[in-house]
Amino acid sequence: MDKILLLRPFIKMISEGKFFALFFSWVLRIQAALMVLGFLYGSFQMWSMMRGSATFGLFIGLVIGQLLFAVLAFVLINILLVRADDINNLPLSTDYFVMPIIVIFVKMTGEIIGVFYAIMGIILGFGIWIMGGSGVVPSIPGMGMFAGNSGFLGGLIPIVGGPVVGFLLLSLFYFIGEQIGALVDIARNTKR
């Protein structure tokens, strides 16, 4: 019978939990590498806007946008790599090994979304200041609330609002992650 059960080592490896930690950590590392390619592609797309209507304001806006986009890419890559190491270094437990990974993953998602909205709000604010608010609002969910603004106040609203929205989303995702972690703690305490 044992000769027929060829998947026994694979199923045993899955049930020990280290498989999930390795899988998730490598997926995050690959995603970080793809983020570098995405940054390069996004940079190329940004600078392709210079064709045809190259104004000084557009050039300054692109330089500032490129710098902030580089900061965004650097921070997101760091978050992915740090969380990949966190998942890989989780202690092996005998009962729940996917839930701690999910907690880290949910918190990481909040960190990524929070940083994204914070930096995109700043980029949008500078874009409104430099380009006058015409056609600056990207098609990112939640950024439309900053549409139609112009002038100094129009740029200040996303510069302040983007980080505030980012912080609120970060808090929400940390809350969800902590609730999932609390469920694991409750389940462990009721087993005793």
Image: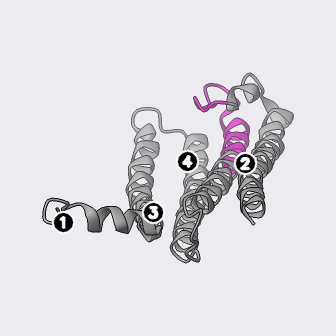
Write down the region rendered in magenta. 118-141
Place of residue 79 in the rendered image (x, y in percent of width and height, measured from the top left): 59, 64
Classed neighbour count for the residue bearing mark 2: other residues with Cα under 10 Å, few (<14), some (14–19), many (≥20) = many
Q: Earlier in the sequence, mark 4 or mark 2?
A: 4
Calculate the distance from the C-alpha at mark 4 to the C-alpha at mark 1. 64 Å
Q: Secondary structure at mark 4?
A: helix
| 73, 10: nearer the viewer | 10
**What residue did someone put label 4 on?**
62
Labelled pair 3, 2 in contact (Cβ < 8 Å): no
State the residue at coordinates (47%, 44%).
46
- Label located before the other in sequence (1 or 2): 1
Q: Identify the amino acid type marked 1.
A: Asp
- For the N terminus, the quadrant is bottom left
Q: Circle 2 — which element?
A: helix
Mark 4 vs mark 2: in front:
2
Q: Earlier in the sequence, mark 4 or mark 1?
A: 1
Q: Amino acid at mark 3?
A: Phe
Circle 1 — which element? Answer: loop
Local secondary structure at mark 3:
helix
Q: Amino acid at mark 2?
A: Phe
Which picture quadrant has residue 117?
Answer: top right
Q: Which mark is residue 173?
A: 2
- The disc labelled 4 sits on which kind of residue? Leu
Percent of width and height locating residue 62: 55, 47
- According to the image, label 3 marks what residue? 20
Q: Which mark is residue 39?
A: none
Alpha carbon of mark 3 to alpha carbon of mark 1: how far?
A: 26 Å
Q: Nearer the viewer, residue 103 or 173?
A: 103
Dot placed on the residue nearer the N-terminal end, 3 or 4: 3
